[in-house]
């Protein structure tokens, strides 16, 4: 039985939503999480890669949720030149179905109520202020009251828009993505691979993220303003046919990924936005799992504190936007500037940079050295990027 009112309603059962629900419930709030799909973690709209050290700051994952650990990245230039460098943080490829279930289980153990097949189709307003949600359930429609809503409903959040918060993205700041999980292939589990070039993924990149020695998530993202002639699916099908002919396609998924500047405001009267709904994914890589978890934890804590203080109007919830900006805003903007420059580089420039870096032993390559070395050989090419690191 669903109650008629809760302290906090969370919309969306991804990592941001379940984490927000968990921390709000741990703080003593009554929490309801509403997820439109039948099951948490399904469908998997994610390449499933995440930094291990960063993940451990927020959650200790179930070992069964981690399919592969790796610490190197292979870059492939448009002409096929490649180089490998080790990252500062061990990465891992998750099984999002298991991982998301575990996040939901932790939220439920903390006291949050989770309901799937619950489609939120509007907000309830009382005296001009948000007072709950309208939701469609298998047994009918219902209005549920709440003092605070946490919108974790993904890219271009409808809940955020209903609350009057800007959540849309201009085309150049939105990646159109398509991914296949391929089986029956040979893949190196020592590293992830990233392919660049206008013929591969204009305004983005293609990825091969191994799940084991014969299975991988293979996908790509292209800038939404470059998808007029060919769609992301068209580019990926061409990529797979060339590099993995005869592979079995185990799953397909499509979606949009924000790579935008930080939103100026991710709060309003009685509402907080978290994860992709708040444009908090990395603007350079599109990765958003740990960002979403960090935002969910912060949103859950701030919402609970606001309830205890009896203050959840816009001016009181502004502390959420400020804390997010103080902790992650500077890094987000730096990555956005790099993204803007990288997307303007020609295939010739990328090839020249790769030729230089391919001469350096992989064990000596670091991310800073990538840009320092390129700057030394071609100072006019990547000076904007180098300034972000030097």
Image (cartoon, rainbow, N blue to C red):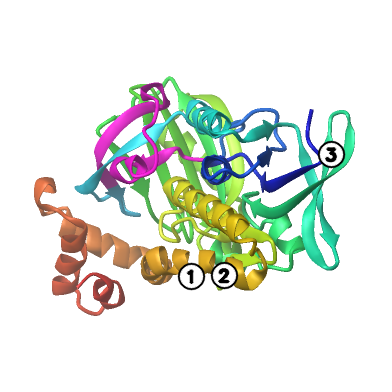
- Residue 228 in sight from this viewpoint: no
| Above or below for 258 versus 53 | below
Q: State the CA–CA distance, disc 1 to disc 3.
A: 34 Å
**What kind of element bears circle 2?**
helix
Residue extending furthest front? 309
* Marks 2/1: CA–CA distance: 6 Å
Disc 3 vs disc 2: which is toward the camera?
Answer: 2
The residue under label 2 is: 318
The answer to whether marks 2 and 1 mark residues whose Cβ atoms lie closer than 8 Å is: yes
Q: Secondary structure at mark 1?
A: helix
Q: Which residue is mark 3?
A: 136
Q: Earlier in the sequence, mark 1 or mark 3?
A: 3
Local packing at callout 3 (Cα closer than 10 Å; few below 14, some 14-19, many 20+) is some
User: Which residue occupies the foreground of this view, 45 or 219?
Assistant: 45
Counting every numbered tag in the picture gives 3
Q: Circle 1 sits on which residue?
A: 322
On screen, residue 295 above or below 1: below
- Pointer 3 with pointer 2, Cβ within 8 A: no
* Residue 60 is covered by the magenta coloring: yes
Q: Which residue is at 69% across, 38% downward?
A: 35
């Amino acid at each position: 039985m669903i109650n008629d009112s809760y302290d906090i309603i969370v919309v969306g059962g991804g990592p941001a939503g379940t984490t927000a629900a968990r921390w709000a419930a741990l703080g003593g709030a009554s929490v309801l999480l509403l997820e439109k799909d039948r099951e948490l973690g399904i469908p998997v709209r994610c390449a499933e890669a995440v930094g291990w050290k960063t993940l451990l700051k927020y959650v200790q994952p179930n070992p069964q949720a981690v399919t592969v650990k790796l610490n190197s990245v292979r870059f492939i230039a448009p002409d096929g030149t490649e180089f490998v460098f080790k990252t500062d943080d061990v990465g891992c490829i998750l099984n999002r179905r298991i991982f998301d279930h575990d996040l939901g289980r932790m939220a439920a153990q903390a006291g949050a109520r989770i309901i799937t097949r619950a489609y939120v189709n509007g907000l309830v307003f009382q005296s001009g202020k948000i007072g709950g949600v309208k939701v469609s359930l298998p047994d009918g429609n219902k209005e549920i009251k709440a003092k605070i809503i946490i919108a974790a409903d993904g890219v271009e959040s409808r809940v955020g828009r209903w609350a009057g918060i800007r959540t849309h993205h201009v085309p150049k700041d939105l990646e159109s993505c398509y991914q296949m999980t391929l089986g029956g292939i040979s893949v190196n589990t020592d590293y992830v691979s990233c392919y660049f070039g206008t013929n591969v993924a204009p305004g983005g990149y293609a990825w091969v993220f191994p799940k084991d020695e014969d299975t991988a998530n293979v996908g790509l993202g292209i800038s939404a303003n470059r998808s007029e002639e060919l769609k992301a699916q068209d580019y990926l099908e061409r990529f797979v046919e060339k590099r993995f002919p005869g592979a079995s396609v185990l799953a397909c998924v499509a979606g949009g990924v924000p790579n935008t500047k930080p939103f100026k405001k991710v709060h309003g009267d009685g509402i907080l936005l978290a994860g992709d709904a708040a444009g908090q994914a990395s603007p350079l890589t599109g990765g958003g799992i740990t960002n979403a978890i960090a935002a969910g934890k912060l949103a859950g804590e701030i919402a609970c504190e606001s309830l205890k203080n009896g203050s959840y109007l816009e001016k009181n919830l502004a502390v959420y936007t400020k804390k997010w900006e103080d902790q992650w805003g500077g890094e987000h903007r730096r990555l956005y500037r790099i993204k803007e420059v990288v997307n303007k580089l020609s295939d010739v420039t990328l090839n020249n940079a790769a030729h230089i870096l391919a001469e350096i032993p992989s064990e000596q390559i670091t991310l800073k050295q990538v840009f320092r070395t390129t700057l030394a050989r071609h100072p006019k090419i990547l000076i904007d990027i180098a300034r972000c690191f030097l």
